[in-house]
Image (cartoon, grey):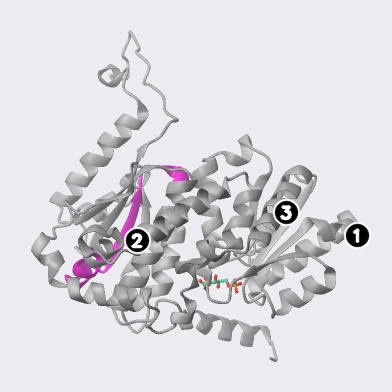
Amino acid sequence: MDNIKLDLTGSFISEEELHEIKTEIMSAQETLLDRKGVSSEMTGWLDYMYRMDADEYRDIKNAAKYIKENSEAFILLGIGGSYLGAKAAIEAIRGDFHNELFSPQVYYAGQNLSGAYLKKLIKVINEKKVCIIVISKSGTTLETALSFRIFRCLMEEKYGEESRNRIFVVTDQLKGALKNMSDLKKYKTFAVPDDIGGRYSVITPVGLLPMAAAGIDTDKFIEGLRSGAEEYTKRDFENNICCLYATARNILNRRKKDVEIFVNYEPSCTSIAEWWKQLFGESEGKEGKGIFPASLNFTTDLHSMGQFVQEGREIIFETNLAVENNEDDMEVPFDPNDFDKLNYISGKTLNYINKKAFEGTFMAHNEGNVPGIIIRVPKMDEFYLAKLFYFFMMSCGISGYTNKIDPFTQPGVEAYKKNMFRLLGRSV
Ligand code: PA5
């Protein structure tokens, strides 16, 4: 069977250099797998896919069925780890124009505080049959809570008592304002496990419910997670690509490559990069340490940021997502007049041309002193996407412990909240 592969041939790291920090990496991996590190109580994601509650999973599928059968659109309310994974999956699997091609349509709210955004979204969904999925582990995040208040009022106005059936909640199983309200209002509620933090929660109801409602095959997704859990927990440095990716990132960072750019050539994978940025940014950026995670969509951004990557400050390395096979493709037609001088590629497919652009760019950036890592994914389906998520989470845990930081907290996020709440006059 094809598999996700890590290609370090353009990373400027030799075999000997990889092995120089093998002991450090293996020790970090052991700390993670044996749950001996800081915040080890937040490593439930390691084996969640084997411990999932079968009744809850059945309820997720039933809720998704209800949403599909009773709505033209659903709105996913959540921020950070409470929506990025599902958005990444829905776009990557259902494709660029899923809202125009499939039903139910999917919209997002609760991820910003913009009045203009919300007002326009309400206009868009106003005439549609709608369901709401609200996701917040703490149940107190302002962005999500505020948009939920607005949508709850709209839903009650529109559907009356029936609104109760159209609202689905994913939150802490015992506490928080959202949990209390859900109990009172009798919303169907799913639990975010205690031992899994936001940016590792795409594998729980946080990801599974919106994915299933959007028509994604969650059985196949869970199969991919199990395959990842089996393969990426092996204590085998040379053959575990999570260890090797964590090693390469750390070596490059020690060489003052402070920015890692996640590059992809498929627009439908843009939000995978957004999820990845949160995973690594929030996990590693602390105590004055960390690699700044950025992302670019090529070839689009070659016409905006390509100049900087090629000739700017030499602080960058690239991690390229290469999707090896894509069934959707088309050929360049032959034009007898050849006005645009493109007949030299007529008969070739767009995916072939995109691949050549990737190879050419990779070489050029290498020549510009930009180390390049390639993650080769056989195809972008539920199985491989889930495995890719797990690959990154595992790599991030290993990388974090190698750097002697806690990859499962985000204390710095509180700073802006404190100021904002003070400025808003909140008393408690
Ligand atoms: O990774 C994290 O923990 C965060 O990004 C959270 O997911 C985000 O802040 C949203 O929190 P909550 O789900 O409590 O609303």
User: In this picture, which residue range is highlighted in magenta?
Assistant: 248-270
Residue density around tag 2, few if under 14, some if 14–19, many if 20 or more, within 10 Å: many
**Looking at the rendering, in which quadrant would you find the C terminus?**
bottom right
Work out whether mark 1 precedes mark 3 in sequence or the reverse, and give the earlier one. 3
Alpha carbon distance from label 2 to label 1: 47 Å
- Taking the image as shown, residue 248 lies to the left or right of residue 382, namely left
Q: What residue type is labelled 1?
A: Glu
Q: 402 or 281: which is nearer to us?
A: 402
Determine whether label 2 and label 1 are within 8 Å by CB. Answer: no
**Mark earlier in primary sequence (2, 1):** 1
**In the image, residue 159 lies at what x, y percent?**
88, 54
Residue 382 rendering spot, x and y as whole percentages:
49, 46
Q: What residue type is labelled 2?
A: Tyr
Residue occupied by mark 3: 63
- Is residue 154 in sight in this rendering? yes
**In the image shown, does 409 or 219 lie closer to the viewer?**
219
Image coords of residue 426 (percent x, y): 69, 87
Q: Name the residue under label 2.
A: 232
* Tag 1 residue: 161
Q: Tell me the number on the disc at residue 340.
A: none
Name the residue at 62% across, 50% down. 212
Residue in the image at 37% along x and 56% along y:
295
Local secondary structure at mark 1: helix
In the image, residue 419 lies in the stretch drawn in magenta: no
- SS at mark 2 in the image: helix
